[in-house]
Image: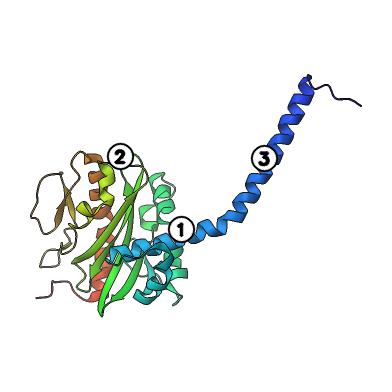
């Protein structure tokens, strides 16, 4: 029986068939490429953790270097208390697998309470120096921002940092992911000498602050800078409780 190619039935049938075929091709392609995509995401995460330790490696070399430097990964709760877990490889641990951006979005959407949130912590040994790496996530002008801050064995002095974003404006908010912003953090402290939490404040861009607990924000990127300030204040307050207990240092080393 001949088909009437000008009929509505033929048009609808052809459209449905085309959608099914294209959808099937896309699904098969996605499934084929997903393992490679997931592995790239995994390596980039290792690369960012290492960058916060001031260890620069390309993505392909990240797994081996990560294994050499990062000795342990764990989770803490919103009160800074460690979550009991096993001693799995840090790269396959619950801490590494936790999607903090997804968790953050659930909290912002009131689908998760603040006291239910979990926080990953990585312990590293770099040239004989013990360091802690603290992941964090927040909101910039156009979307999510995130970063990793490493802290020295005193539990208060910043060793290094790296930040990134999804869609901040080039030349403005996007500058949080450049050395001009990130290199301000080493040597800053998140508590006063008596152990009282201060956090790391992000001042208005161009302030030229000398505050040992603060850095200059991005000129022209006020909303993004405010987002980093909120992210640091909120997240480091939780990590501060953990670090005091983990290091036994409520006061600075003198």
Residue 251 shown left or right of residue 143 in the figure: left
**Res. 77 in view:** no
Residue highlighted by disc 3? 22
Please state, as top left, top right, bottom left or bottom right, where the C terminus lies in the image: bottom left
Residue 147, image x, y percentages: 31, 56
Q: Earlier in the sequence, mark 3 or mark 2?
A: 3
Q: Residues within 10 Å of mark 3 (few under 14, many from 20)?
A: few
- Closer to us: 96 or 4: 4
Q: Earlier in the sequence, mark 1 or mark 3?
A: 3
Report the residue marked by disc 2: 169
Do tag 3 and tag 2 residues touch (Cβ < 8 Å)? no
Q: Which residue is mark 1?
A: 41
In 3D space, how far apart are the residues under numbered discs 1 and 3 (Cα atoms)?
27 Å
In the image, 237 versus 170, the foreground residue is: 170
Residue drawn where x is 74% and y is 25% of the image:
11
Query: Which label's residue is closer to the chain start, 1 or 2?
Result: 1
Against 87, residue 223 (above or below) is above
SS at circle 1: helix
Q: How far separated are the C-alphas under marks 3 and 2?
A: 35 Å
Where on the picture, by quarter, is residue 130?
A: bottom left
> Mark 1 and 3 residues: CB-CB less than 8 Å, in contact?
no
Query: Secondary structure under badge 3?
Result: helix
Colour scheme: rainbow
Instruction: In the rendered structure, find residue 124 and report the number of the disc placed on it.
Output: none
Residue at the image position 41 percent from the left and 62 percent from the top: 59
How crowded is the residue under tag 2: few (<14 C-alpha within 10 Å), some, or many (20+)? Answer: some
Tell me: residue 74, above or below residue 214. below
In the rendered image, residue 136, in percent from the top left (x then y), is placed at 32, 56
Dot 1: within a 10 Å radius of its alpha carbon, few (fewer than 14), some, or many (20 or more) residues?
Answer: few
């Amino acid at each position: 029986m001949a088909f009437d190619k000008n009929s509505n039935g033929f048009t609808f049938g052809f459209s449905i068939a085309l959608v099914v075929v294209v959808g099937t091709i896309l699904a098969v392609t996605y499934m084929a490429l997903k393992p490679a995509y997931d592995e790239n995401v995994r390596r980039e995460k290792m690369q960012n953790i290492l960058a916060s330790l001031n260890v620069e490696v390309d993505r392909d070399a990240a797994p081996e270097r990560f294994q050499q430097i990062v000795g342990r990964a764990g989770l803490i709760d919103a009160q800074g208390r460690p979550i009991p877990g096993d001693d799995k490889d840090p790269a396959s641990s619950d801490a590494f697998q936790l999607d903090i951006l997804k968790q953050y979005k659930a909290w912002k959407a009131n689908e998760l309470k603040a006291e239910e949130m979990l926080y990953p912590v990585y312990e590293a040994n770099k040239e004989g120096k013990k360091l802690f790496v603290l992941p964090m996530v927040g909101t910039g002008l156009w979307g999510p921002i995130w970063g990793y801050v490493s802290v020295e064995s005193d539990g208060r002095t910043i060793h290094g940092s790296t930040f990134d974003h999804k869609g901040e404006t080039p030349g403005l908010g996007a500058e949080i992911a450049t050395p001009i912003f990130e290199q301000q953090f080493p040597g800053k402290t998140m508590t006063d000498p008596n152990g009282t939490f201060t956090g790391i404040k992000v001042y208005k861009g161009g302030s030229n602050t000398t505050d040992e607990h603060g850095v200059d924000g991005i000129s022209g990127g006020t909303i993004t800078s405010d987002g980093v300030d909120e992210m640091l204040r909120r997240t480091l307050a939780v990590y501060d409780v953990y670090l005091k207990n983990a290091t036994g240092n409520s006061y600075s080393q003198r």
